[in-house]
Image: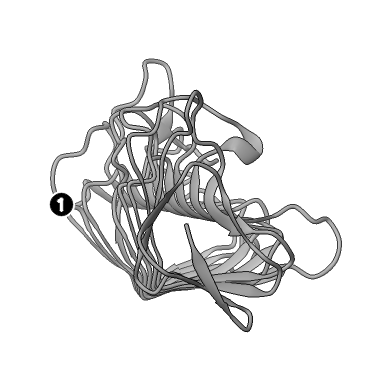
Amino acid sequence: CTFETVGTTLRLTADCTTDATILIPDGFTLDGANFTITATDPAGGHFQGAVVMNAGASASIVNTGITAQSLADVCDGGPGRLRGIFLDGAAGTIRRNRITGINQGASRCQEGNGIEIRSLAEDGAPVSVEIADNVVEQYQKTGVVITGSVDAWVHDNRVGASVNQEQLAANAIQVGYGAWALVTANRIAANSWLGYPGTLDVATGVLLFRAAPGTTVSGNAIGGAGDIGIYIAADAVVVEANELVDEGDDLGGYDIGIADYGSGNRVSGNTVRGYQVPYDSLGGSAKSKVASAR
C-alpha cells in the first residue's frame, strides 16, 4: 500500500493489498480517501494480527475500506488475533470507515473482530476513543470490542451480524473488563448461535461484560435474529430508550430481548418486540445462559 504524507495525515493513494499489519505512526491519521485495504495471506503463511493498528499512544483512521480475502482458517491468540482496526493502548478517532469480511471463512476461531479498542494499563487515565459513522459487516467473532482501561463514545454506526453464526457465539458490540462506553444511536444486528452440546454460550447484539459503572446503552435500534438482544453481565449500568425487534429464525433455543444479570442497573423505556421473553433477570428462566466474551 502506498501513502502520501500531508502533515500528520497518511493519505492512501489507491486500493491495495497487504499481507502484514499496517502501523500508523504516533499522532498520525490514516485517511483512506475512500480506497480499500485488503488483507491477504503471505506466501507460505497466514495473515496474523490487525489489518491496521497504532504504533504509538494515539492514532486515527478515517474514510477507509478494510476487508480480507480468503484468509486461512488458522487460530491465533493475543496479538496474532485477526482484527480489522485495532487500537492497543491508544486514543483516537475511528470515523466513516467500512470494515467488511474480517473473517476466516467457516471458522470456529475466537477472533475476527471488526474494530477493537483495548488498553491493559493498570495505572493512569483511560484512553479516550470515538467510534462513529462506520459500517461493520461480515465479521467473525465481534463487530466492535471495547476492553480494559478505555472510555469510548460509540455512535451512529451500522453493525451487521457475524458471518460465522453457525460456528461460534458472536456479539455485535461488546464492552467489558472495566471499559466505560456510551453506546448510542447505532443500528445493530443481533446474533444467534446453535451452540455445542453441553455448552451454555449465547450470541448477542450488545454485550456488557463487567463493563464499568455508568456505561450507557441508549437510543439504539437492534434488529435481526438474536439469542439475546442486550445482555447485561455488569453492575450499575444504564440501558434505556432502545428499540429491539427480533426478526427471522434463531439458531439457538433462547430468545430474550434484554437479559439483566447484574445488580443496580437502570433498565427503562426500551421497546422490545418479537422476542419470546422480552425481559429476563437473575430470577428469570434463562439465567443459566452465558454470553461468550473475547
Q: Is residue 246 left or right of residue 5?
A: left
Q: Is residue 276 left or right of residue 180?
A: left
| Residue highlighted by disc 1 | 247
- Other-residue count near label 1 (Cα within 10 Å), few / some / many at <14 / 14–19 / ≥20: some
Q: Is 69 displayed left or right of 111 in the figure?
A: left
Could you tell me residue 205's position as x and y percent?
36, 53
- What residue is drawn where x is 69% and y is 74%? 27
Q: Which residue lies at the image location 39% right of the left edge and 45% below the top edge?
A: 102
Q: Residue 9, position in %: x, y? A: 57, 78
Q: Is residue 132 above or below residue 42?
A: below
All told, the count of numbered labels is: 1
Spot the residue most to the right.
Answer: 123
Element under label 1?
loop
Residue 269 locus on image (x, y percent): 35, 74
Residue 98: quadrant of the picture = bottom left
Residue lying farthest left?
A: 248
Residue type indicated by callout 1: Glu
Farthest-out residue, top: 197
Closer to the camera, 225 or 106? 106
Residue 212, position as x, y percentages in the image: 65, 61
In the image, residue 276 sits, relative to residue 60, either above or below, namely: above
The answer to which of 118 and 283 lies nearer the viewer is: 118
Q: Is residue 277 visible?
A: yes
Foreground residue among 245 and 285: 245
Q: Residue at x 43, y 32 (%)?
A: 201
